[in-house]
Image: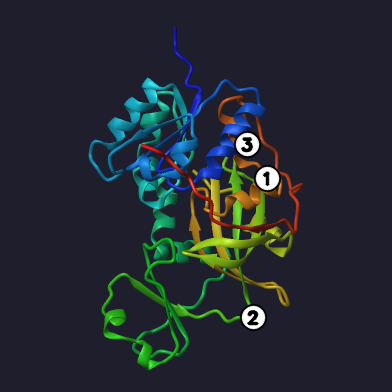
């Protein structure tokens, strides 16, 4: 008798407490006999691991034994869905999607080709422009026009980014950094948005929720509000179906409301840290995942989410006594 793979595993769970809770609540509301497990390199220091049904310490995703270890963990604990949460593990997990699928385990991430586009911002620029989404213009660093924005082509969490306003800011460290790409700086008349997009098993977008980033801390939204605006139709026309893409895409862009000008920034093919705002606006992507992959239901496109949902974040402690 084949054992059903009924549980959910959130990898590199770290601080994703709310995402873990949403999966737990969604499974319960759907009447599923599913547990939500977590993994982390150091579960003792990962808050999400304290609230999941069970947690596991694993090796680094770059370790040659990682996939074998994860596969065994899934078999031993009847895991049928894996939810990646960090950029560094996306490539290795997407490369092994078919291997896991052969064992009845769904990795909710795009195929490796699309992940490679998202992980290299030089490829992201070419992709976005090919589908009609303008990107900030590239700057010739030897003949600069200030201000300039610089970021690493493979960076995340807003690390090693620079706003260069004059020749004095253009230091030798910046000039000699082989990973930096240079582009025009988009002015303050634009607002920064993150857009959560859910893609079904058929690679078609099912929901598009723009959220304005009012305040950002350490690269992650701290204060934000959902906005039902021009961005929704703009992206639906250009990104309505993407081969190989499933699950949550987190797209960042600049938007100027006065003339509906949009500039793309980057795409993260996973749940973003600010997804809980989208959830509170009644766009429940974890529920969609469980309905599609565990209940074999089809998800239709919807725009019934709630605009002008405001999120204000604060810190809260997790206490453990040894």
Q: Residue at image x 56%, y 44%?
A: 18
User: Which residue is label 3 attached to?
Assistant: 288
Of callouts 2 and 1, the N-terminal one: 2
Q: Secondary structure at mark 1?
A: loop
Q: Say whether residue 14 is visible.
A: yes
Dots 2 and 1: beta carbons under 8 Å?
Answer: no
Image coordinates of residue 15 in percent, x first then y, are 46, 48
Quarter assignment of residue 84:
top left
> Is the Cβ of the residue at disc 1 closer than 8 Å to that at disc 3?
no
Q: The N terminus is located in which quarter?
A: top left
**SS class, disc 3:** helix
Residue 40: percent from the left, percent from the top? 37, 41
Of the pair 158 and 294, the residue shown nearer to us: 158
- Secondary structure under the numbered disc 2 in the rendered image: loop
Q: Position of residue 295 (x, y in %)?
A: 61, 24
Side of 67 relative to 78 (left or right): left
Q: CA distance from mark 2 to mark 1?
A: 29 Å
The residue under label 2 is 189
Vertical order, 51 against 79 (above or below): below
**Residue lying furthest front:** 321
């Amino acid at each position: 008798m084949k054992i059903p793979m009924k549980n959910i595993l959130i990898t590199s769970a770290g601080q994703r407490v709310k995402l873990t809770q949403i999966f737990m609540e969604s499974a319960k509301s759907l009447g599923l006999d599913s547990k939500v497990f977590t993994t982390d390199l150091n579960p003792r220091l990962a808050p999400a691991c304290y609230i999941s049904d069970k947690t596991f310490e694993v090796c680094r995703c770059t370790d040659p034994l990682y996939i074998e270890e994860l596969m065994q963990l899934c078999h031993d604990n009847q895991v049928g869905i894996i939810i990646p949460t960090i950029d560094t593990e996306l490539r290795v997990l997407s490369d092994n999607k078919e291997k896991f699928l052969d064992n009845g385990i769904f990795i909710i991430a795009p195929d490796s080709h699309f992940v490679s586009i998202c992980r290299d911002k030089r490829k992201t620029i070419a992709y976005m422009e090919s589908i009609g989404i303008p990107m900030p213009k590239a700057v010739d660093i030897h003949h600069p026009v200030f201000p300039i924005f610089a970021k690493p082509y493979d960076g995340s969490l807003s690390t090693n980014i620079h706003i260069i306003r004059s020749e004095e800011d253009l230091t030798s460290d910046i000039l000699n950094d082989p990973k930096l790409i240079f582009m025009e700086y988009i002015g303050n008349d634009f607002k920064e948005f993150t857009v959560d997009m859910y893609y079904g098993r058929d690679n078609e977008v099912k929901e598009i929720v723009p959220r304005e980033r009012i305040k950002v801390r350490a690269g992650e939204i701290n204060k934000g509000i959902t906005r039902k605006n021009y961005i929704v139709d703009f992206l639906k026309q250009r990104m309505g179906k993407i081969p190989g893409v499933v699950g949550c895409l987190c797209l960042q862009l600049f938007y100027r409301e006065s003339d509906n000008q949009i500039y793309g920034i980057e795409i993260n093919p996973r749940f973003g840290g600010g997804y809980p705002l989208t959830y509170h606006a009644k766009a429940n992507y974890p529920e969609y995942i469980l309905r599609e992959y565990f209940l074999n239901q089809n998800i239709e496109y919807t725009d019934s989410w709630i605009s002008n949902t405001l999120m204000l974040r604060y810190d809260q402690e997790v206490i453990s006594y040894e």
